[in-house]
Amino acid sequence: MTGSDATREGPGGKRGRSGRGGRGEQLMAPPAEFASYYGRPVIKAPAWRARDIAGYFFLGGLAGAGSVLAAGAHATGRTTTATAMKVSSVVAVTLSTAALVNDLGRPDRFANMLRVVKPTSPMSVGSWLLAAYGPAAGAAAASAVTGKLPRAGAAATGAAALLGPAVATYTAVLAADTAVPAWHGAHRELPYLFAASATAAASGMALVVGPARETAPARCAAVLAAVADAAVTKAAERRLGMVAETYRQGRAGTLLRTASALTAAGAAVGAVCGGRSRPLAAVGGLALLAGSACTRFGIFAAGIASAEDPKYTVVPQRAAKEARRTTTTHSAERTQPT
């Protein structure tokens, strides 16, 4: 018997009812406290390592959003920033892929994922995205550094920019596609949060590597990213309900509060001082990069915490079930003749 059944049954297992026609239920016992068998988790937490997968989330976001900023800088004649961002993107996607392969255990497992195309699998789609984006980002960076094949380099820059947003956000879909309460419950907001975090990271990198005279677009993007990050985080917490506790408590809470402070401070320093002082622009950029990294590691930690505590799996499910039952009961009452 489940906890919710126990609250509706009286002695002898018969349900106590009151009201006309047997409608409406009277509690015959106090609400039961939930506990899983031996206090064990109801779902199995992902076996992903935080260093590898949270790092993979962060670096992929930096690479994808960086290619978008690189394309913008390339198109507007900010050549120094464009070249630096192209190089940083190819380095980031290389490290991101290395982190993924390290978590998989063997390089051939990544290659095996490219043997088939499965549109319903975020991992399959993500593997093909990386396989297409990596060469494009590499060609763009090589052309920018060597100065050779400028037309091919421009085409590669455009291709990397087109794939960049998907590379930056598909990991959110990958996480939300699991049964982990803190990720799946925020499946609508998580891609936007990853996009905001990726934009903050790429803007921070542009502030670090670009001349102050070329960083105006990055400074604007950093402010927009900081505002979006705060707004989407609040929206996700509202949707999660009690599961949002995992975003505020423990290691995840510490990381996400630090991320919020660093992102806001980095955007403010970049906006106010980034156009006049290269050292201050770099300080703001480093704060944005650190804030984005803390966001990814904080979300990862919140997901693991929510999977390990059974109440975050069962209590929301019971609440949703009870809400559906109440709605059905009320609908039936309204349709019955008086």
Image (cartoon, rainbow, N blue to C red):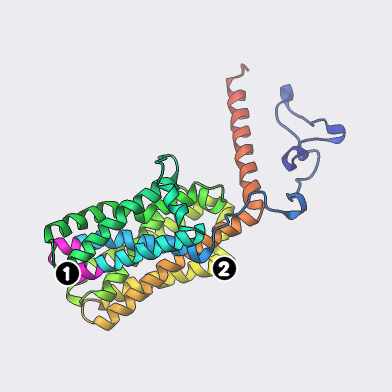
Q: Which of labels 1 and 2 is toward the front?
A: 1
The residue depicted at 21 percent of the width and 80 percent of the height is 276
| Predominant secondary structure, magenta span | helix
Specify the quadrant of the image occupied by residue 108: bottom left
Residue 74 in magenta? yes
Residue 300 is situated, as x and y percent measured from the top left of the image, at: 51, 60
The residue depicted at 27 percent of the width and 64 percent of the height is 221
Say what amino acid the circle numbered 2 marks. Answer: Arg
Question: Badge 1, how many Cα within 10 Å: few under 14, some, many 20+?
Answer: few
Residue 134 in magenta? no
Of the image marks 1 and 2, the number of the one nearer the N terminus: 1
Vertical side of 301 occupied by 184: above or below: above
- Camera-nearest residue between 67 and 198: 67
Say what amino acid the circle numbered 1 marks. Answer: Thr
Q: In the rendered image, is residue 190 in sight?
A: no
Q: Secondary structure at mark 2?
A: helix
Label 2, on which residue?
A: 251
Residue 224 is situated, as x and y percent measured from the top left of the image, at: 31, 62
**Furthest-top residue in this view:** 337
The residue depicted at 61 percent of the width and 19 percent of the height is 336
Residue 263 is situated, as x and y percent measured from the top left of the image, at: 38, 69
How many marks are shown on the rendered structure?
Answer: 2
Q: Secondary structure at mark 1?
A: helix
Q: In the rendered image, is residue 152 in sight?
A: yes
User: What label does residue 74 carry, if any?
Assistant: none
Residue 171 is situated, as x and y percent measured from the top left of the image, at: 43, 53
Could you tell me how far apart the alpha carbons at marks 1 and 2 are, in whole angstroms?
Answer: 44 Å
The residue depicted at 53 percent of the width and 48 percent of the height is 178
Specify the quadrant of the image occupied by residue 65: bottom left
Label 1, on which residue?
A: 146
* Magenta residues (range): 72-85
